[in-house]
Amino acid sequence: MKSSRIHSIDALRGLVMLIMLLDHVRERFFYHVPITDPLNINEIDTSLFFTRYLAHFCAPVFIFLTGISAWLYEHPRNSNSKRSASSFLFKRGLFLIVLEITVINLSWFGNYNTLYLQVIWAIGICMVCLSVFVKLPRIWSGIIGLIIILGHNALTPIQFAASEIGYSLWAILHDRGIILDNAFLKIKASYPVLPWIGLILVGYYCGEIYNKNISVKKRQQILISAGTICLITLLVLRGLNIYGETLAWVNYGWDIKSLMSFLNFTKYPPSLDFLLITIGVSSFILSWFEDLPAKSLNILKTFGSSPMFFYVVHLYILLILYKIASWRFKTSEDTYWGVDYLWQIWLLTIILACVLYFPTRQFSKFKQESTSKLIKYF
């Protein structure tokens, strides 16, 4: 039976998964070189700045495509009937939240000393919220999503002290922070979810462009137009330091630091400018992938067709490799072991991508053939 999957979406998802692998290798083996959010361009090396910058595309692209995929779930390309995505989104969202606080949290440090609510948690929350919005007319998802994306930067001045009522909720929604700290458990909300909820709603609204009645050429025109609008809006807002980013950019003349300063956006929570550049550029890539033969994208499609399997497996491989390296080089618990040069991070990423390709391909094939609903969640 011919697959109903869309090769451009799987390929873009696969691309950001590989970029994510690079960033996680950096986090594991280059952690002794600290980075901030936004990045400190006066202290960070140019190559590390742009290596880290690539990772900015991972979360927004994945969450935006999750919204599109929810629309595609409702409107199967191999069927003329519509089905409800609400139940699936709700259950899968809860599944991701449980996965985050159990399997994934353990993979970071090999213990449960602190529970970090990170990107998988954020995606889970977004899916639970979307499970409600899919019951409403689609236009409301687009309107409310845009209001959140465009307006959440205006909420930055709102802050709560840790002792105030509303602190924990606001830390989860907009400001990252410790939401529980006692003798038994410490929980940190690392990914404020409000802007991501806005993005998944917009993604769901945009899913209509993948209606089987819309031609590839028409879809490309829409994607290019959307990407152009995003980038022009970014140039105006950022160029004039009007709105959309809490950290104003500084002109250093013709120095590369001017470009670094202009592109230096806040990720936690993702600023409007952060989302404009990541979704804007990704729209152009989606359009470009439509022109490429499906076979030329097979490797990227493989990684993109089983993202959760790849995500969990690569985290545990990195944990095991780090434990082995720490033992081999006798690193103390309070000292981070790492490589000396950034090129070594890129090399290790390439090697791991080659190694992980084959089990990911096998699992992707297994998932397509399986009738298990649990397997489909991966």
Image (spheres, helix red, strand yellow):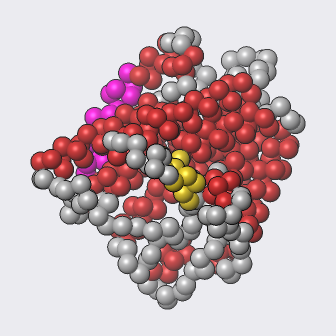
Q: Residue furthest front?
A: 183
Q: How many marks?
A: 0
Instruction: Indicate the position of residue 337 as horizontal and vertical percent values.
Output: 22, 57
Asked which quadrant contains residue 320, the reply is: top left
Give the quadrant of the N terminus.
top right
Q: Residue at x 29, y 64 (%)?
A: 32
Q: Residue at x 43, y 84 (%)?
A: 255
Instruction: Indicate the position of residue 105 as horizontal and vertical percent values.
Output: 44, 41
Asked which quadrant contains residue 256, the reply is: bottom left
Instruction: Indicate the position of residue 171 as horizontal and vertical percent values.
Output: 63, 57
Q: Please indicate, yes or no, whether residue 218 appears anywhere in the rendered image.
A: no
Residue 360 drawn in magenta: yes
Instruction: Indicate the position of residue 295 as horizontal and vertical percent values.
Output: 45, 30
Q: Is residue 93 above or below residue 122?
A: above
Q: Residue at x 62, y 31 (%)?
A: 94
From which residue to which does the magenta span run? 347-362
Asked which quadrant contains residue 64, the reply is: top right
Q: Is residue 106 above or below residue 6?
A: below
Residue 166 drawn in magenta: no
Q: Residue at x 41, y 81 (%)?
A: 42
Q: Residue furthest bottom?
A: 253
Decide which of 58, 178 is in the foreground and name it: 178
Q: Is residue 371 left or right of residue 73?
A: left
Main SS class of the magenta portion in the image: helix
Q: Please indicate, yes or no, whether residue 79 appears anywhere in the rendered image.
A: yes
Decide which of 250, 185 is in the foreground and name it: 185
